[in-house]
Image (spheres, rainbow, N blue to C red):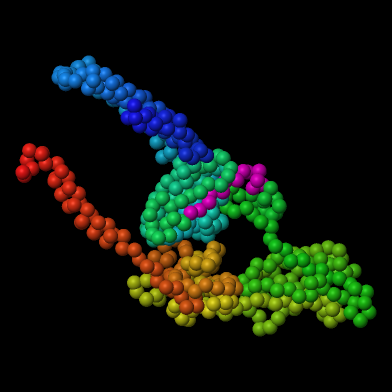
């Protein structure tokens, strides 16, 4: 009775178990349907096989048939159990072939996502017009954003070792290999968040190499785009309206100081993008200006009374002192309509992206004033990223306390300021250009924060496995040989 229960329990679990992951896309739906079709055949075969087994256990038990009986065989039965499994295999092949053809034939795609893997993180670059290799339309790290019902072409690669990009609910599992691009396609029909986990062991941090796939509806993206004042895109993070700094030009009615500007002091970080909306609450027209050379527009068009104008700029240069802002009318400034702009910065570390003159065998390199870069605990740091080549570059550090990653691109011949950043944990590691292939070509360096970090203890997994095998296999064979000897062969 106990033996029959042991066989019956797994069959019941198999028969009533649901799928571990609900299908959320067309590929997953077809794969799931194929899985249950094959499972139905497996359950049918199991019922026949285990049913016959149980029948023979009961029919020919020792209490009923104490003496063994020789049976020559049954040719008809032998033909049945040869032909029927063959028919089942042909049927399974027939229903599997359309699913295989469907999954291996990508439909026309709406955009391309380049999936880049590196121990132990995922990065996603989005391209609209298959212009892979140029500046992407959007980039994200640790999160992928796609619109429900849209078709994404995936180009999956790795910067170091073999990884595997796997999303169970979407039936996606594709290897990410160094120096190779594997192409697949992805479509999700159900909005929601899905987890991707590296499915190929890649090192001590493998367990944490995860990313979230956010699937949103077209209506949701339209609302977000309308609120941000931009055109909707079926990929990438939700657009956010720029943070707007409001400045007001006002008349006070005070005889000694008849004008004022609100606020009369502002503070921004070096490299920050600034959107400034200037309201004219005064009775005459003014032109507003920031007295500093910026990347963008630092002066508005004339602003009539009770209207506003907007200027957008980036603070990519350090001034010699504080910067004034206000109307271009010197008289209005002299009577109080003037403010003071402070640009925050810390110690500037210059990193040069160079594509020629690199020490062999490197074809690309990063040039710094010191190597490794040394950063004190609590010290504000601004990275000056200068591109002296003809390709785009970006910047990343494997700092454990927080993500240090300039996800944008430094255009050829230009520079940007990234920071200020304050480091609060002793660490040491690498910094590099995160563009595909650039790190392998030599664009990486070392950094030390504070006292640095102790080297990680390396577990000798291979050596331990080799020793275990060398000891265990001979011992197992010796045990088997010893206990397999017939009793009449054992020495008296």
- Check the image and name the residue furthest to the bottom: 320
Quadrant in which the N terminus appears: top left
Q: Position of residue 122 (x, y in %)?
A: 48, 56
Where is 187 relative to 236, above or below? above
Quadrant of res 364: bottom left
**Residue at 62% over, 43% down:** 217
Q: Nearer the viewer, residue 54 or 80?
A: 54
Where is 439 relative to 29, above or below? below
Q: Is 211 contained in the magenta span? A: yes
Residue 134 relative to residue 473: left or right: right
Q: Nearer the viewer, residue 120 or 187?
A: 120
**Residue at 28% over, 60% down:** 464
Q: Is residue 367 visible?
A: no
Q: Is 47 contained in the magenta span? A: no
Give the total number of marks visible in the rendering: 0
Quadrant in which the C terminus appears: top left
Q: Position of residue 159 (x, y in %)?
A: 41, 60
Residue 283 relative to residue 8: left or right: right
Q: Is residue 239 visible?
A: yes
**Residue at 38% over, 57% down:** 202
Q: Position of residue 381 (x, y in %)?
A: 57, 76
The part of the chain drawn in magenta is 210-222
Quadrant of res 430: bottom left
Q: Nearer the viewer, residue 476 or 249?
A: 476
Where is 47 relative to 388, above or below? above
Residue 283 relative to residue 12: left or right: right
**Residue at 55% over, 43% down:** 150
Q: Position of residue 291 (x, y in %)?
A: 72, 77
Where is 152 relative to 207, above or below? above
């Amino acid at each position: 009775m106990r033996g029959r229960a042991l066989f019956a329990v797994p069959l019941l679990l198999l028969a009533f178990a649901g799928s571990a992951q609900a299908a959320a896309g067309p590929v997953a739906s077809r794969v799931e349907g194929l899985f249950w079709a094959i499972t139905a055949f497996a359950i049918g075969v199991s019922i026949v096989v285990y049913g016959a087994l149980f029948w023979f256990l009961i029919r020919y038990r020792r209490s009923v048939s104490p003496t063994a009986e020789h049976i020559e065989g049954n040719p008809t039965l032998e033909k049945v159990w040869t032909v029927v499994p063959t028919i089942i295999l042909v049927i399974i092949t027939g229903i599997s072939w359309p699913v295989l053809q469907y999954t291996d034939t990508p439909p026309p795609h709406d955009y391309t996502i380049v999936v880049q893997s590196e121990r132990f993180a995922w990065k996603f670059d989005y391209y609209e017009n298959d212009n892979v290799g140029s500046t992407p339309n959007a980039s994200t790290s640790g999160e992928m954003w796609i619109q429900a019902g849209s078709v994404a072409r995936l180009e999956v690669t790795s910067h170091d070792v073999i990884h595997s990009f796997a999303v169970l609910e979407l039936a996606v599992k594709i290897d990410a290999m160094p120096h190779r691009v594997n192409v697949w396609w992805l479509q999700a029909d159900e909005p929601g968040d899905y987890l991707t986990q590296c499915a190929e062991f890649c090192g001590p941090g493998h367990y944490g190499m995860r990313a979230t796939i956010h699937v949103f509806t077209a209506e949701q993206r339209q609302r977000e785009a309308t609120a941000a004042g931009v055109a909707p895109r079926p990929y990438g993070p939700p657009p956010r309206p720029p943070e707007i700094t409001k400045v007001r030009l006002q008349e006070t009615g005070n005889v000694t100081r008849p004008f004022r500007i609100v606020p009369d002091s502002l503070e921004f970080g070096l490299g920050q993008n600034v959107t400034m909306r200037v309201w004219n609450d005064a009775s005459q027209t003014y032109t507003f200006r920031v007295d500093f050379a910026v990347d963008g527009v630092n002066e508005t068009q004339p602003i009539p009374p009770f209207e506003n104008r907007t200027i957008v700029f980036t603070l990519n240069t350090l001034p010699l002192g504080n910067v004034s802002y206000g109307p271009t009318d010197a008289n209005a400034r002299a009577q109080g309509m003037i403010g003071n702009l402070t640009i925050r910065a810390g110690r500037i570390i210059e990193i040069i992206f160079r594509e020629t003159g690199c020490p062999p065998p490197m074809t690309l390199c990063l040039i710094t004033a010191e190597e490794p870069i040394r950063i004190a605990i609590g010290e504000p740091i601004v990275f000056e990223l200068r591109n002296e080549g003809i390709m785009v570059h970006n910047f990343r550090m494997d700092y454990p306390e927080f993500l240090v990653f300039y996800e944008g691109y430094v255009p050829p011949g230009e520079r940007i300021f990234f920071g200020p950043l304050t480091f609060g944990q002793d660490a040491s590691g690498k910094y590099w250009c995160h563009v595909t292939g650039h790190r392998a070509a030599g664009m990486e360096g070392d950094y030390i924060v504070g006292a640095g970090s102790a080297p990680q203890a390396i577990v000798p997994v291979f050596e331990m496995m080799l020793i275990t095998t060398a000891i265990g296999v001979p011992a197992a064979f010796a045990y088997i040989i010893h206990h397999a000897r017939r009793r009449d062969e054992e020495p008296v």
